[in-house]
Amino acid sequence: MRTRVAIVLPYFGAGGGEHMVSRLAAHLDLSKVEAEVICIFGEPQNNELEKKILEHGVPIKYIGKGKGFSSAAIKRLNHELSEFQPDVVHTHLSACVYCAEWVLTHNVKMLHTVHSMPAFELIMPKKVVMAAMYRCGKAIPVAISHEIQALTQSYYHLKTTPELVYNPVDVSRYSKLEKKKRKNFTFVNVGRLHEAKNQILLVKAFEKILEDQSDTDLFILGDGPLKEELETYLKEHKLTQHIFMEGNVENVEQYLAEADAFVLSSNYEGLPLVILEAMASGLPIVSTDVGGVKDVVTDNGLLVEPHSIEKLASAMMQIKANAEMRKDFSERSKRNVMQFDSSIIAQEYIALYEKYARLVKH
């Protein structure tokens, strides 16, 4: 008999959590699980993330909550869960709090994927709810890296170690493209233009490289609240001929295929999907040593301490200067990323679904 799982997320935006849900749901073995995705906020976006799920044969239900508290939306969510009668509820981001009432009143466990540092994952009232859910054993945290696993256990004072399942990546999507190098040596960064991603540090580090190496370009893919600040800095420092802000793009894999190296400058992370995508593209990695990055950037890149312009610039110049190092890192990226392919990660989640469904039945 198939395990019934409700995968619940707030919305289908452009973040890593939403991409993770899409990849997971689109690779579940439907001979083993019967799945339904529930989106709490908003209406269908008709984007690629939703299309992948639907094409795989997994339905998506929309609660249409909107902004602010809505008791009516909670009732609609509870009704949807009661209609579907899942054996396991798998939540992401703030969806965990909205599902808490239904899980508490039914003989079901909630698996909650912790996508980032627990101190930043939820606002305080929601943290209190999840702390209670963890303590009573109704919710089980699933960390996406060893560091997030340790931080979650410590932050919530858990007696048992959280489960660990890494983020998935569709390896073939990124590995199949023909590599097409640009004229200049090219770094690429992908991420929301946000303080946590610290692209201003990256820009300043790259500015140091340009002081004596003008045959180098940087492409920054993404949008966010720091866009105007970054654009102003590039204009004032005359960097627009070498640093290109491309905004949100649909063909990230094409930019990765045309790059020589991937660079990440974040202040903190869970396990960034963009690192796995860059690895699938066969890129050497330069990254700040934050969150779960060290779990996947082992022998295939350079890690530096966060917040240091000089150390990030030095690592980027080291990668650029050493063709043999880049070749080795590239081969290792392609080899190491295979264990994070979406089909493998989906099987690991199915094992968790079956495990916790059995626990409540016995």
Image: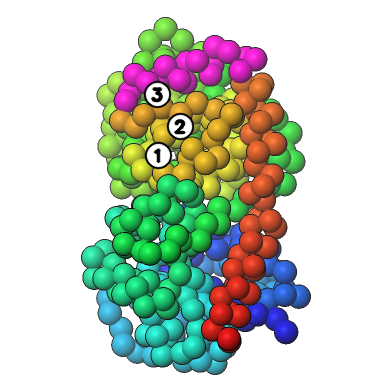
Three-letter amino acid code at the position of disc 2: Ser
Q: Secondary structure at mark 2?
A: strand
Which mark is in front, 1 or 2? 1
* Residue 322 drawn in magenta: yes
Task: Choose between 186 and 269: the one closer to the eye.
Answer: 269
355 sits to left or right of 127: right
To which residue does mark 3 refer?
A: 312
Instruction: Provide residue 251's location: percent of width, then percent of height.
Output: 60, 45
Q: Quadrant of the C terminus?
A: bottom right
* Residue 269 drawn in magenta: no
Task: Choose between 76 and 28: the one closer to the eye.
Answer: 28
To which residue does mark 2 refer?
A: 287
Main SS, magenta residues = helix
Q: Secondary structure at mark 1?
A: loop
Identify the disc placed on residue 102.
none
Q: Contact (CB < 8 A) between labels 1 and 2? A: yes
Q: Quadrant of residue 25?
A: bottom right
Q: Mark 3 vs mark 1: which is more N-terminal?
A: 1
Task: Choose between 69 and 250: the one closer to the eye.
Answer: 69
- Residue ID at (31%, 75%): 132
The CA distance from mark 2 to mark 3 is 8 Å
252 sits to left or right of 210: right
Q: Mark 2 vs mark 3: which is more N-terminal?
A: 2
Per the rendered image, the range of residues in magenta is 308-325
Q: Quadrant of residue 85?
A: bottom right
The CA distance from mark 1 to mark 2 is 8 Å
- Residue ID at (58%, 38%): 278
